Amino acid sequence: MKKPPKFDFNRALARGHVCYDAGVGQWWESQAADGAHRSAYRAIAEYIRDKMRAAKIKSPLIVDYACGGGFVLLQLAKLLPEARLVGLDGSKKLLALAQSRLEAQGVSCAALPADEAFATQGPRVRLIQTLLPNFKLPKGKADAVAFVFPNIAPGPKDQPIYDRNGYLNRVDVAVAKMLARFREMDPEDEVTKDDPDTLFDGYMTERVLARNIYGMLKPRGQWIKVDYANALRSELSQLSQQRCLFCECALEAAIKETRSEQLFAMRDNVFRRSKVIMDVYHQTKDESDKSGGYFITLLEGL
Ligand SMILES: C[S@@+](CC[C@H](N)C(=O)[O-])C[C@H]1O[C@@H](n2cnc3c(N)ncnc32)[C@H](O)[C@@H]1O
């Protein structure tokens, strides 16, 4: 079993996306290349292929949001030869690895500016180096957006981007504050020991990313989100389920009569046991994070 790296993840991630061009990126590349991740990437790509086929979308445009070293793009290129694929990521090094990985398997691939990357003609896979979220990317073009093992690191100067794109939304702020302050009836259910301010910041940050993804999708487009998990969402406490849905802009229910803006509806959730959960253990060093796996959630734009 691989040992966790020695560096402090919290400090490294606080530097923003640049940490993926340094130690965090090296760690990630070695994790993503192992057997557990490879099987997960294959299963995720199969899931996306099945959803595209079920929706009878002939040559879908699929965006991989924070695509890293291109493992999901490679599997999608193999399974969906008719699809146009766009990979977005902030790391120059991981994108260069993605390009060589795809080309080594005979998949045409190029780093392109955003307007060209979304065009009908072009290579099978188009890569865009960009800070995320990015609200200047072409809108309403994607049939599906994949967001796999998300770990977006907001940099010290990125807050104004979040503030301009929903972080300060008055009603959402009120709901986020309530969801951050509520406590589980059963303390064993408490998935996080973070204080309410940290939770609030996490929820509002995630909602901005969800808004960014929503903007890129066609009407009724599909968002395939893959998170580390211990169980199906339906097995989580009601509070945990509401928190997840709120972060995804998919919470339908009102919280104390206050309804947050809903952009997505959750359509499906599957859980798979997998050693990919060791990514979490490496970051937390918490023994309880050694078991679990990941779940795939399908969200449909409203
Ligand atoms: C945990 S990795 C997941 C990569 C890929 N989805 C996968 O499953 O292999 C997180 C990715 O997010 C990217 N990332 C993190 N923060 C970012 C930011 N603020 N802007 C752009 N990319 C970012 C990193 O470069 C990295 O590729």
Image (cartoon, helix red, strand yellow):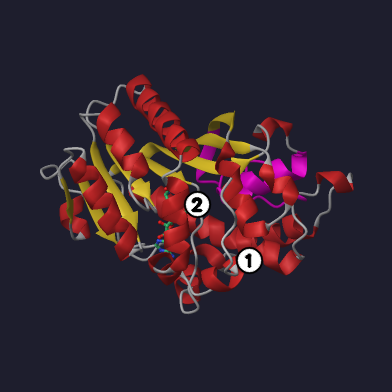
**Does the residue tagged 2 have its C-beta within 8 Å of any atom of ligand 1?**
yes
Tag 1 residue: 201
Outermost residue toward the left? 121
Q: Quadrant of ligand 1?
A: bottom left
Label 1 or label 2, whichever lies nearer to me, is 2
Which residue shows up at 58% across the image and 38% down it? 275
Residue 208 drawn at (x, y percent): 50, 59
Image disc number at residue 188 = none
Mark 1 and 2 residues: CB-CB less than 8 Å, in contact?
A: no
Residue ID at (22%, 58%): 114
**Measured from the top left, where is residue 268 in percent x and y?**
54, 29
Residue 192 sits in quarter: bottom right
At label 2, the amino acid type is Pro
Residue 123 highlighted magenta (yes or no): no
Q: Please give the name of the residue rendered at 46% of the width and 67% of the height, measured from the top-left corner.
A: 23
Q: Quadrant where the N terminus lies?
A: top right
Residue pointed to by mark 2: 150
Residue type beneath disc 1: Asp
Span highlighted in magenta in the image: 237-266
